[in-house]
Amino acid sequence: MITYEEIKKNETINTYIQAADESLIAMGYTEHSFAHVTYVAEKAAAILEELGYPARTVELTKIAGYMHDIGNVINRVDHSQSGAVMAFRILDNMQMDPKEIAMIISAIGNHDEGFGVPVSPLAAALILADKSDVRQNRVRNNDLSTFDIHDRVNYSVKKSELKINEAHTIIKLKLSVDTHMGSVMDYFEIFMQRMVLCRKAAEKLGLQFKLMINEQQLI
């Protein structure tokens, strides 16, 4: 069986991740490189592991998380769908089991808030992990005077934490935001669709999604 460690060492996959991130740099986007995809892979897997999903499902979630943004090498528009097609070709050439490929590409193809739907627990965990990665060091622009709203929001987040409660009924995204740099309204302006998708993803896992910013519950 193909493992997460094999995927992380795969030269082809890593080339696409790096090239995709370089394309996003040219477009002015925040960091989508190895730090992001590794965070998403491990956070998504941790969610399903904590909820008691089988070890192989957890492993497949890691693989999907690591590969989820390779479609950005083609274009940011519809990158989840193009990434799913790319992942299919790569994993098929690696002779991965078709049932496992289907689980992975379905999750990748549904992770974006434009048209994404949490069609499976794997997809739901990927969505939650991806949308929770808001942090200051994702901002590449060093000139604060030219920050756009995405720069301001990411730069303003001093701490981000995604946790499931002990009763396994709630998953909570807690953000500590410096409101001198970016307002709470700025966050909602660009992330509202993402938070709605997170709520649907949480429901797929039998959880309730809550968003807290500076200790105030907003969702």
Image (tube, helix red, strand yellow):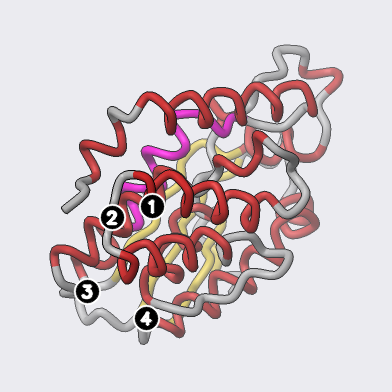
The residue that appears at 31% across and 45% down in the rendered structure is 94
Cα gap from disc 3 to disc 1, whole angstroms: 29 Å
Give yes or no for residue 43 being in the magenta stretch.
yes
Element at label 3: loop
Question: What residue is shown with label 4?
Answer: 205
Residue 130 position, x and y percent, is: 50, 52
- Local crowd at mark 2 within 10 Å, few (<14), some, or many (≥20)? some
Q: Which residue is mark 1?
A: 92
Q: Are marks 1 and 4 in contact (CB under 8 Å)?
A: no
| Mark 1 element type | helix
- The residue carrying mark 3 is 51
Residue 90: % across, % down:
43, 44
What distance separates the C-alpha of mark 4 from that of mark 3?
A: 8 Å
Tell which of 219 and 112 is nearer to you: 112
User: Relative to 183, is 172 above or below?
Assistant: below
Give whichever of discs 1 and 4 has the lower sequence position. 1
| Residue found 54% across the figure and 47% down from its top | 86
Span of residues in magenta: 31-44
Q: Nearer the viewer, mark 1 or mark 4?
A: 1
Quadrant where the C terminus lies?
A: bottom right
Residue type, label 1? Asp
Relative placement, left or right, of 141 versus 197 is: right
Q: Which residue is mark 2?
A: 96
Q: Earlier in the sequence, mark 3 or mark 1?
A: 3
Name the residue located 49 percent from the left edge and 75 percent from the top edge: 201
Q: Are marks 4 and 3 in contact (CB under 8 Å)?
A: yes
Front label number (3 vs 1): 1
Q: Regarding mark 2 in the picture, which secondary structure is present there?
A: loop
Picture quarter containing residue 123?
bottom left
The secondary structure making up most of the magenta span is helix
User: Is 26 placed left or right of 92 in the picture?
Assistant: right
Q: Amino acid at mark 2?
A: Met
